[in-house]
Amino acid sequence: MIKKILVAAMAFATGNGLFAQSNPVAFTGATIYPIIGKPITNGTLIVQNGKIIAVGAASLKIPSGAIVQDASGKIIMPGIVDTHSHLGGPEGGDASAALNPDTRAFDAIDPTTDGFKKALAGGITTINIMPGSGHLMSGQTVYVKMREGKVMEDIIEVNEKGIYGGMKMANGTNPMRGTNGFPGTRAKSAAMDRELFVKAQEYKAKIDKAGKDSSKMPERDLRLEPLVEILQGKRIVHFHTHKENDILTAIRLSKEFGFRVVLHHVSEGWKVADEIAKANVACSIIVIESPGGKLEAMDYSSTNGGVMSKAGVLTGLHTDDGITDSRLLIRSAAVAVKAGMGKQAALEALTINGAKMLDMSTKIGSLEKGKDADFIILSGDPFSVYTKVEQTWVEGKKRFDISNPADKAFLVGGYKVYSPDRAEYLNHDDEIGVQ
């Protein structure tokens, strides 16, 4: 099924002319943050056919016939990886059950919604789109690239494990309802998770025993198939959790059943950073400038990123859009730095660490030869409040340009940009603050 979807995605991309032009494009004069390695002053980035073919100093030879773009005074860094978003309207599990491993965000998302333009304005080039967290297991996430697309097959991204999404789980207060089959306590939440994973273990054992003999294969079970991929280490569990005890329960479950997990939000991660590091568990955190909203996040601290990264935890940043607007994820890194996170750690949290959490680090997350040409051009220091994303490139194709008034509107125009009558509004620079 995954191979069929990948082939379909490539067919759509080819048919819609989404692949970058064959001529190389060279960006010169910028300070380049490759993430892997030190910043390059007066650097050169060369891309062709959607890939990075060279990155280095000004002395780098530019191929004949290359289109040269002067980026003097700008910053070039990898495209931002948002490890947790809800753009496009993913629905996931419904009220019929607390555990919905068979449902896919893939089947609910509308890739033509304007939220994707907003994300491009924020420099985001890859997103893990999640179902909600109101269930113990709300379903399969989907990894997408911010390519131009009318259908999901245009934008899905199959990772290094051959999987195009993870599995969303949650604990704490969100899934605790005590009615209609939902748990009423934390203990029951964990018990229900265990029960389903035991069934998945039994299902996997039957598959393993059958081997290549199709006559001995168990009857297909759509609920258990993705859990088998989890048990095989192919599919990552993305686990919504806040409180210290919930964080440790999520880690305990991952150890018990041997699955890979990324903890999300982790509001009290600073309390148990050493335990998280010891378990070798990655954390995708949210940075909130005005904390509040739910009691279980009352001990949230902006120092989370600094404490955990210094403890050795692989730490990433996410929007949980619309909790944090996709346009402001880079600002979250600045707030984390202000609260004690190292600048290099914060840059890695925006890029390569998120790529690792999605099993995509051989393709994205840093500016290296052979990787996808996903990068952003900034007007200045990534951690300055005055800095703006000027251009966003995905696989060598420019997807956002601040010099285009319609694009700029999605960066600075306010929410009137998303109204049905926005067409006239987008054509009036004075209304959206274009200077």
Image: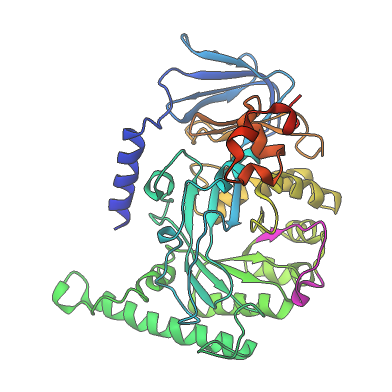
The image position of residue 211, as x and y in percent, is: 22, 72
Q: Quadrant of the N terminus?
A: bottom left
- Position of residue 388 in the picture relative to residue 233 (left or right): right
Q: Please tell me which residue lies in front, 16 or 35.
A: 16
Quarter of image, res 322: bottom right
Q: Is residue 301 visible?
A: yes
- Residue 274, placed above or below residue 302: below
> Which quarter of the picture shows residue 390?
top right
The percent coordinates of residue 89 (x first, y second) are 52, 58
Which is more toward the observer, 126 or 194?
Answer: 126
Instruction: Give the x, y percent position of residue 134.
Output: 58, 75
State the colouring used for the structure image. rainbow
Range drawn in magenta: 284-299
Q: Residue at x 59, y 80 (%)?
A: 175
Residue shown at 73% from the left, 32% from the top: 431
Q: How many marks?
A: 0
Q: Is residue 196 above or below residue 20?
A: below
Q: Residue furthest top?
A: 64
Instruction: State whether the magenta stretch is mostly helix, strand or loop.
Output: loop
Q: Is residue 287 magenta?
A: yes
- Tell me the residue at 78%/61% (across/down): 304
Residue 376 can be seen in this image: no
Residue 245: within the magenta? no
Left or right: 14 as drawn, with respect to 182? left
Give coordinates of residue 308: x percent, y percent: 74, 61
